[in-house]
């Protein structure tokens, strides 16, 4: 098949439009001998028949393994340089009680950023001492609850929060451990909205102001200052940004050591994953190794002790473990003007969309798609997978090639949807959020039930 001129330049016509690119699919994904997609030994059509579509499917063994690998890689690499590392799972990527327990069992701590996420973590039975609490505008009630349950660490994000956390700690008779989020000014190479350490944004304290702000924290006997925190953005493929942020933070870290202990440094998350076959993320073990060397070398150069390091990946742990199943409803071959002629874009509309995966429309994120229920040797056709919502920007997959005989009723699978899909899901157009099921060793169980029509109507005071 020739290249469709409407295809983005990065997208090649695949030799086999049924193939599952290894980096993009969970480790438990495979084709059965009759060509169907199975996830951890459970066939796609069986999942769809039992739970309906859209359906979020999480490969449990894959998620647990990634959590364990992150824990082991950072621990090993920082120990190699004579230090220690704590890995927090960034719950914003996808948090449910089950997932909180999986990451806990792998030895990870857990990072929450709202009272709601805190409530899930506590309900899951995670020890408050293993929780970190982020957020640029935590409410007084959120701060109060966090302090009262004995939260491991609160990340202070503004000058106002110093008094608020100190007051709550004083009231509860506690000493609250805190970090200070700084804006390192490092421009992460990623989508604009995901680059959280640019100067012109809402998170953190500018580096130049940090010594004064830390002095204010230290002036409160109810606060125990642990160190600085930086998160430079998400879906980052290069280690350069993390390295630069670490260097900038360590300069200030050294300055702070002159007036008291600074036992920790938190370098945040943001490690990228493969969404399409052309994405080539750096393996977490390599990131851990290079961060350990950068931080340890820099500490040697500055003549300071290596602080205890913390990192907080979310997407890299849960993103690749998730797959969303959809059913095709309608198909349109749309003739699009292109280079003096026209080309056909096949719009394949599915029964979900921006309510279950808003990343494509919010960030222009790219995904890939495969027919889940069968393989086909029909010529590959360029498709755009659209949702069912009343927005022309309601796109799930901007561009991929599928067998050209894709038809209404086909089951489609979109991989790498474990992170920031369910957690960003909405009820737009009064569509219920789909259930989440975990698959493992041929077994399937619901870890979050789907919303029913009754759920959708329940809060309408006029009904
Ligand atoms: N830490 C902080 C403070 C964040 O804001 C985020 C994501 O926005 C993360 C960690 C996790 O990022 P990722 O899921 O890309 O690893």
Image: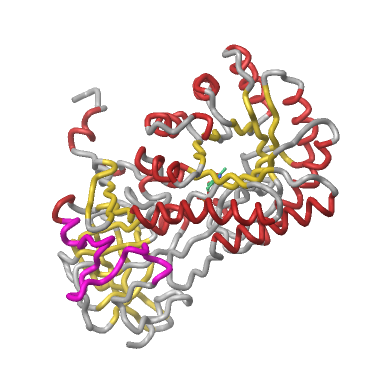
Residue at the image point whose x is 23% and y is 47% from the top: 445
Residue at the image point whose x is 19% and y is 72% from the top: 374
Residue 185 vs 238, above or below: the answer is above
Q: At which x and y percent is residue 16?
A: 32, 81
Q: At which x and y percent is residue 127?
A: 47, 31
Q: Quadrant of the C terminus?
A: top left
Q: Could you tell whether 286 is left or right of 420 in the image?
A: right
* Extent of the magenta region: 22-48
Does residue 24 show up magenta in the picture? yes
Q: Could you tell whether 109 is left or right of 384 in the image?
A: right
When asked about the image quadrant of residue 260, the answer is top right
Colouring mode (rainbow / by chain / secondary structure / one colour): secondary structure
Q: Nearer the viewer, residue 435 or 283?
A: 283
Q: Quadrant of the N terminus?
A: bottom left
Residue 141 vs 107, above or below: the answer is above
Q: Nearer the viewer, residue 233 or 445?
A: 445
Number of numbered markers = 0
Q: At which x and y percent is residue 173?
A: 60, 13
Does residue 44 show up magenta in the picture? yes
Residue 312 vs 127, above or below: the answer is below
Residue at the image point whose x is 16% and y is 66% from the top: 408
Q: At which x and y percent is residue 349?
A: 25, 62
Residue 296 vs 200, above or below: the answer is below
When asked about the image quadrant of residue 218, the answer is top right
Residue at the image point whose x is 66% and y is 61% from the top: 290
Q: Nearer the viewer, residue 453 or 56?
A: 56
């Amino acid at each position: 098949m020739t290249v469709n001129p409407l295809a983005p330049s990065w997208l090649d016509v695949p030799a086999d439009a049924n193939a599952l690119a290894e980096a993009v699919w969970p480790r438990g994904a495979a084709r059965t001998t009759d060509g169907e997609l199975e996830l951890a030994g459970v066939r796609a059509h069986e999942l769809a028949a039992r739970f309906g579509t859209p359906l979020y499917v999480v490969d449990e063994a894959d998620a647990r393994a990634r959590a364990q690998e992150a824990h082991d890689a950072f621990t090993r690499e920082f120990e190699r340089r004579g230090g220690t590392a704590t890995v927090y799972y960034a719950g914003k990527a996808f948090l449910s009680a089950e997932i909180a327990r999986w990451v806990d069992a792998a030895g990870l701590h857990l990072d929450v950023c709202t009272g709601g996420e805190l409530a899930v973590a506590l309900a899951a039975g995670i020890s408050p001492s293993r929780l970190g609490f982020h957020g640029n505008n935590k409410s007084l009630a959120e701060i109060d609850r966090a302090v009262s349950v004995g939260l491991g660490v609160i990340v202070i994000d503004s000058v106002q929060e110093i008094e608020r956390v100190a007051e709550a700690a004083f009231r509860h008779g506690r000493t609250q451990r805190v970090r200070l989020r700084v804006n390192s000014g490092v421009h992460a190479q990623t989508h604009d909205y995901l680059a959280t350490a640019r100067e012109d944004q809402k998170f953190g304290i500018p580096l130049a102001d940090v010594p004064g702000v830390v002095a204010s924290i230290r002036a409160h006997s109810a606060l125990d200052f642990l160190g600085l925190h930086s998160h430079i953005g998400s879906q980052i493929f290069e280690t350069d940004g993390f390295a630069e942020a670490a260097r900038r933070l360590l300069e200030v870290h050294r300055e702070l050591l002159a007036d008291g202990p600074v036992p920790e440094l938190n370098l945040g998350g943001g490690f990228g994953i493969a969404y399409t076959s052309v994405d080539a993320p750096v393996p977490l073990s390599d990131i851990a190794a290079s961060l350990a060397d950068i931080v340890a070398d820099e500490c040697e150069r500055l003549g300071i002790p290596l602080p205890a390091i913390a990192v907080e990946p979310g997407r890299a742990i849960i993103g690749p473990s998730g797959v969303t199943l959809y059913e095709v409803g309608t198909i349109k071959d749309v003739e699009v003007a292109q280079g003096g002629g026209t080309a056909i874009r096949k719009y394949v509309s599915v029964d979900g969309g921006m309510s279950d995966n808003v990343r494509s429309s919010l960030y222009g994120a790219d995904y890939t798609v495969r027919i889940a229920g069968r393989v086909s040797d029909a010529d590959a056709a360029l498709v755009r997978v659209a949702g069912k919502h009343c927005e022309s920007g309601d796109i799930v997959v901007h561009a991929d090639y599928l067998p050209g005989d894709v038809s209404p009723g086909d089951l489609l699978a979109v991989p790498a949807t474990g992170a920031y899909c369910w957690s960003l899901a909405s009820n737009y157009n009064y569509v219920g959020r789909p259930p989440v099921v975990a698959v493992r060793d041929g077994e399937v169980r619901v870890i979050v039930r789907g919303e029913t029509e009754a759920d959708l109507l329940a809060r309408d005071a006029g009904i």
